[in-house]
Image (cartoon, grey):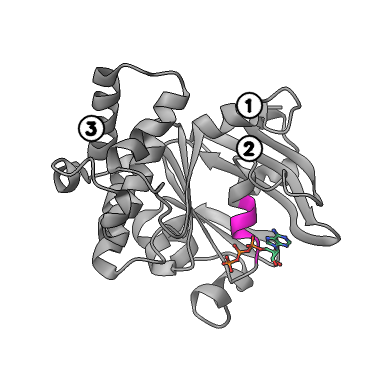
């Protein structure tokens, strides 16, 4: 079902005049008997940065991880509703999860490079996808590291273990690792929360540069970060999506009292 056919009740969270990549329709998720997501309707615009904010435990990470099916595989997890990725149901049986994960990459809170060389971290994914020629792998490694704005810092030490890098550098290597398999979407779960302010700024600059080529969805505790880098912001509370709109509007003129209370620091 495309946007045009969607029920009117979804309209407030539909991104007008933008191309979209995900449509989330009346989505609910339970961990066992505990419901974590309630009736979320949201469209994620293509080639934009969408931030998801909200207090601890409101379901931000759950929603994010659902988008490349990292949650519904957990025993006891149940979902209802629909999530369309490029108009295809991500839960449809024949949809291979691996295929979805190739197109929708994920960067985690703590940098998690493999205990391998910097080169191998990047070449690993393409190799799994059948690329064997050294020349092509070399090109992918360079392009991905350049894309993640870390090439100049590591080009002379590609054979060193990725653990020898700083946290901020490791995170950029993890972003490069995602880029190497040429995804369309990057999901980022608090990608800077383990980093110092300078590394954080570098990653923020990088994220802004990446949106020309990728759709980025970032979960962040940091409202200033959402305001600095995102085009759209979604505010969640107790598993519900309270408000979703242009970032400037959400922070300057929120419609919902709960959003206003949160962004002015009254709770959370
Ligand atoms: N694997 C899991 N098993 C059971 N319950 C879970 C699991 N992961 C999350 N939850 C529960 O789901 C709810 C939402 O958690 P989630 O991690 O999505 O929130 P969050 O907004 O990302 O929080 P934070 O900002 O603290 O990371 C919480 O009540 C949490 O306890």
Q: Is residue 26 left or right of residue 54?
A: right
Q: Mark 2, residues whose alpha carbon is within 10 Å: few (<14), some, or many (≥20)?
A: many
Is residue 226 one of those drawn in magenta?
no
Mark seen at residue 142: 3
Q: Main secondary structure of the magenta part?
A: helix
In percent of the image, x 16 and y 40: which residue is there? 155
The quarter in which the N terminus is drawn is top right
Q: Percent from the top left, x then y, of residue 39?
A: 76, 52
Q: Give the range drawn in magenta.
A: 58-63
Picture quadrant where residue 57 is located: bottom right
Name the residue beneath numbered marker 2.
23
**Rendered position, 113 above or below 129:** below
In percent of the image, x 27 and y 32: which residue is there? 141
Marks 1 and 2 sit apart, C-alpha to C-alpha, by: 8 Å
Compare residues 129 and 80 and report the one nearer the observer: 129
Labels 2 and 3: the sequence-earlier one? 2
* Discs 2, 3 touching: Cβ within 8 Å: no
Q: Where is ligand 1, by quadrant?
A: bottom right
Labels 1 and 3: the sequence-earlier one? 1
Q: Percent from the top left, x then y, of residue 266?
A: 55, 83
Name the residue beneath numbered marker 1.
87
């Amino acid at each position: 079902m495309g946007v045009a056919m969607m029920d009117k009740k979804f309209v407030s969270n539909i991104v007008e005049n933008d191309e979209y990549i995900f449509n989330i329709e009346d989505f609910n998720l339970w961990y066992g008997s505990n419901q974590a997501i309630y009736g979320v309707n949201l469209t994620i615009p293509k080639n934009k940065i969408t931030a998801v904010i909200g207090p601890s435990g409101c379901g931000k990470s759950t929603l994010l991880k659902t988008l490349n099916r990292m949650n519904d595989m957990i025993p006891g997890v149940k979902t209802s509703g629909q999530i369309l990725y490029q108009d295809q149901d991500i839960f449809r049986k024949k949809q291979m999860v691996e295929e979805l994960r190739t197109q929708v990459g994920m960067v985690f809170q703590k940098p998690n490079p493999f205990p391998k060389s910097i080169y191998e971290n990047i070449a690993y994914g393409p190799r799994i996808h059948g690329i064997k020629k050294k020349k092509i792998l070399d090109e992918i490694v360079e392009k991905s590291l350049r894309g993640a704005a870390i090439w100049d810092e590591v080009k002379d030490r590609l054979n060193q273990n990725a653990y020898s890098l700083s946290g901020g550098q490791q995170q950029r290597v993890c972003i490069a690792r995602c880029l190497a398999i040429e995804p369309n979407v990057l999901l980022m779960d608090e990608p800077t929360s383990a980093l110092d302010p300078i590394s954080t700024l570098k990653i923020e600059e990088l994220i802004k540069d990446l949106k020309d080529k990728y759709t980025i969805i970032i979960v962040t505790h940091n409202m200033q970060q959402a305001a600095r880098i995102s085009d759209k912001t979604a505010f969640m509370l107790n598993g519900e999506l309270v408000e979703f709109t242009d970032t400037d509007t959400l922070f300057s003129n929120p419609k919902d009292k709960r959003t206003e209370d949160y962004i002015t620091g009254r709770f959370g």
